[in-house]
Image (cartoon, rainbow, N blue to C red):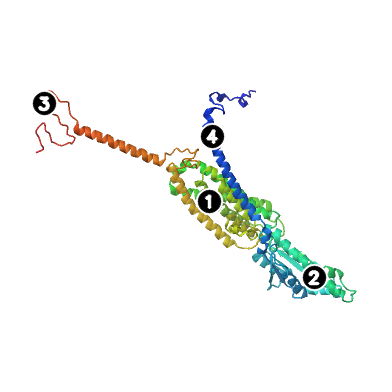
Amino acid sequence: MNLSIFSLRAQPEDADRISFKDSNLKPTVKRSMWAYLELALISTGMIWTGLPLFFGSMYRRSVHANNLELYVVDLDGGYIGSNVTRMIMDIPITQTTPLWHEQSGFDTVDEVKDWVRINTWGALVINPGASKRLDDALNNGADYDATQALTVIPSSGRHPVAEMLFVESSLTSAAYSVNQQFALAQVNSYNSLEPSSELNYAALFNPLLYTTTDASPSGFSNAAVLTTFATLTCVLCTIAFAILWKLTTFSFFQRVRFRDLYIMWLVIFLGLALFLSLNISFAILAYRGPNYNDLALTYTGATFFKIWFAIAAEALALGLWLFNWFLFLPPHFLAWPSIATVITDVVSCMGCPELAPKFYSIMYATPAYNAGHIVMYVVSGAYPENGKCAGILIAEIVATGLALSVSIWFRQFFILRGITDAHGFYRGYIYFHSTVPYYKDVAANANGQIESGNLQNESTLSANHYSYQNPSSDPNDIEISDCDSDNVSLRAGNLGV
């Protein structure tokens, strides 16, 4: 088998090529090295833009825990309810713990659960009849289930990361603390009394345990990264399409009308958003299943379409946003809006605005945060703010869509005047190459042609006016050239009369 085609020593076409060391390549190599150095400096700036943006959102987030609010709800109405409420409200206020508030007006744990799902992060409930059950156990020796005293209600669907790191731990820590304090006070009070033979010692030493019921269970363990990776895959695929379209549509901007270009890009990005979000929705359905477990909400057809359209709105807003940047920026700057967009939207999914510095309040406006909020509500029923989130997404789509009309107009303007080339390099850059002549050169050439044409016309006219024949031997033989086509002739003596 002939393997010469794979030889590293020479290729058949190398006969007419030069060595890399050839002096003729030095200008090209030098020019390329400067371009690569420029790109390295730009990349450094991109890294120091993206990573601090990510790390800053996670920096000392525990000191912002007091932006989260938890509630203690007394459904008992007895001495357990009053004492536990006092203990909770006496917890020292620090930056690293959520703020506690007292809430009333409920009759059952289910009512509290619904209120938590809609309004807040979590609650600690003193169950109805807790004092009566403990009295029966201490005085009559009745059976006692300490876990019936308290109920811890987190709402994990609101923000799985914040709930896991701060809310659930604060709720369980408070329940454990009040159990210890209450048991110690109870033991001290019974030491001064005569022991009863019917005393339930388990109730004496361990009176207040808890059960946990999630107000908005997401139903699967990877809920914390569901919207994060949905956003990441969506943005990365959109970037690939946007770069391809920027580099391959030069002829469109040359030949197609502005109005048609604008409508075309809107339709294309809408179709791309629906396509990508459809695949993401199918992936979520394939993993989670219609009935993943008995805690989660049932995954219905309506659930599928809600997730599809929420992610489609996010994809459309992000796609239009990125393409606005790509139409203006040369290739070596395309990573900057890409990195900034990816990091910002990923942070808004994984991070929690309440646990970040004030600068990161921008998370509330990102497409990923609002679409993710809708998705988590659809999946878990937590913190319904669909109207506000949908309104923000629609406003961003409208704004980026209007901005796209301006971007397309300028892109076409620059192409038709030879200011930018197919890749997006601007005139003057070392890699700029455009088949469209520069508009200033065209104007200069046109002016030059006009001036040369005027000079030529003037010389021709002068020759027509003042041309004469060489004097002949006959002095009376005079020839006068008349440039006007009239009936005046000096030779014939006809003066037009």
Specify which label sits upstream in the sequence, 4 or 3: 4
Q: Pointer 4: what residue?
A: 30
Q: CA distance from mark 3 to mark 1?
A: 87 Å
Q: Closer to the camera, 176 or 308?
A: 176
Between label 1 and label 2, give the one nearer the viewer.
Answer: 2
Q: Pointer 2: what residue?
A: 182
> Mark 3 and 1 residues: CB-CB less than 8 Å, in contact?
no
What residue is at 77 percent from the left and 66 percent from the top?
Answer: 177
Q: Position of residue 286 (x, y in %)?
A: 67, 51
Q: What's under tag 1, amino acid-wise?
A: Leu
Is 360 located above or below residue 1 in the figure?
below
Q: Pointer 3: what residue?
A: 475
Q: Position of residue 417 (x, y in %)?
A: 42, 43
Specify which label sits upstream in the sequence, 3 or 2: 2
Is 379 located above or below residue 126 in the figure?
above
Res. 423 visible in picture: yes
Q: CA distance from mark 1 to mark 4?
A: 37 Å
Label 1 neighbourhood size at 10 Å, few (<14), some (14-19), many (20+)? Answer: many
Q: What's under tag 4, amino acid-wise?
A: Lys
What residue is at 66 percent from the left and 55 percent from the top?
Answer: 58
Label 3 neighbourhood size at 10 Å, few (<14), some (14-19), many (20+)? Answer: few
Label 4 neighbourhood size at 10 Å, few (<14), some (14-19), many (20+)? Answer: few
